[in-house]
Image (cartoon, rainbow, N blue to C red):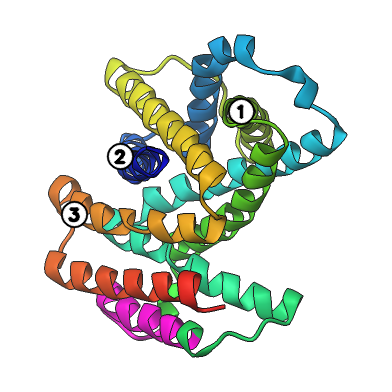
């Protein structure tokens, strides 16, 4: 039964992650400030999570819990901010597959911090991700990484990878529900600080069309956040992150269908190679 529930949570997480990106991109295309979109997303998520406050065991909330919760909140808010900034400038079908670079960053961090040398599978996985990237970017030139959308997405995945560790620790110290509520409220606080620090945007009345998109974004982001916590509860972070990469295929298809992005078959082929490379690193590469 647990395997079935975990599998359903993974599918739901993958789908809602892609849909959340779609709605965030639409808001950015409609003229909404990406940093403002990030804040409203967390603000609405906080409102949605209010009823859960009555079901939390507050005895969990000790100093160690708050240390990891605060770190997770900071990294989560910054991560999602960079995602929306990237979506404003780039193609969904390109930015989605870049998320698999998380596996390469994990290897580099392991070499520098833990002195872990990747095995042959790790090297093979890196090679496959690089080969797959050629089909996504339509170029082998490293100059592609000078593009702002690519840079923002890479920043996002770095913060996301670190955030995942803190989320796992918060869940171990408390519960899935507690992790969800705390990440929502702390995400709102830190995204507001980011908003006030880097923009002069204030709360404003939005048009009906955009208000619907905001609600849909928050709903998908909320489901994604909760299912992520659920999966982390029962599956090791490395394996979970590998399974989450399935969303890159959905992003390529949605980019083609909704935003008329080109080279569908080429990008699907590249995404499949990247997916295999990422899975090879995360499952066999250590």
**Mark 3 highlights which residue?**
253
Q: Position of residue 145 (x, y in %)?
A: 46, 74
Q: Nearer the viewer, residue 60 or 17?
A: 60
Q: Is residue 111 left or right of residue 2?
A: right
N-term mark: 2 or 1? 2
Label 2 neighbour load within 10 Å: few <14, some 14-19, many 20+: many
Q: CA distance from mark 2 to mark 3?
A: 11 Å
Q: Is residue 134 left or right of residue 41?
A: left
Q: Secondary structure at mark 3?
A: helix
Contact (Cβ within 8 Å) of mark 2 with mark 3? no
**Mark 2 highlights which residue?**
19
| Residue 135 falls within the magenta-colored stretch | yes
N-term mark: 3 or 1? 1
**Mark 1 highlights which residue?**
188
What span is in magenta? Answer: 123-141
Question: Which quadrant would the C terminus be assigned to in this image?
Answer: bottom right
Q: Position of residue 163 (x, y in %)?
A: 62, 49
Q: Secondary structure at mark 2?
A: helix
């Amino acid at each position: 039964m647990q395997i079935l529930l975990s599998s359903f949570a993974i599918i739901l997480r993958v789908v809602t992650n892609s849909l959340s990106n779609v709605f965030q991109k639409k808001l950015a295309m409609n003229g909404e400030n990406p940093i403002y979109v990030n804040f409203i997303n967390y603000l609405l998520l906080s409102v949605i999570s209010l009823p859960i406050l009555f079901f939390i065991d507050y005895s969990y909330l000790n100093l160690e819990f708050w240390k990891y919760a605060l770190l997770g909140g900071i990294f989560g808010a910054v991560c999602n901010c960079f995602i929306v900034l990237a979506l404003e400038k780039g193609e969904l079908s390109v930015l989605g597959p870049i998320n698999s670079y998380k596996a390469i960053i994990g290897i580099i961090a392991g070499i520098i911090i833990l002195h872990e040398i990747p095995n042959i599978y790790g090297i093979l996985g890196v090679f496959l991700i690089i080969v797959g990237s050629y089909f996504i970017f339509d170029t082998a030139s490293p100059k592609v990484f000078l593009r702002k959308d690519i840079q923002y997405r890479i920043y996002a995945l770095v913060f996301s990878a670190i955030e995942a560790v803190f989320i796992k620790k918060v869940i171990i110290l408390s519960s899935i529900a507690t992790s969800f509520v705390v990440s929502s409220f702390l995400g709102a606080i830190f995204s507001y600080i980011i908003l006030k620090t880097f923009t002069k945007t204030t709360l404003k009345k939005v048009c009906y069309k955009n208000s619907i998109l905001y609600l849909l974004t928050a709903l998908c982001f909320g489901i994604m956040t909760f299912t992520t916590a659920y999966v982390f509860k029962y599956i090791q972070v490395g394996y979970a992150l590998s399974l989450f990469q399935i969303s890159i295929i959905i992003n390529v298809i949605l980019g083609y269908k909704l935003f008329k992005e080109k080279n569908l078959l080429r990008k699907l082929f590249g995404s499949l190679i990247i997916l295999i490379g990422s899975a090879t690193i995360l499952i066999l590469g250590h």
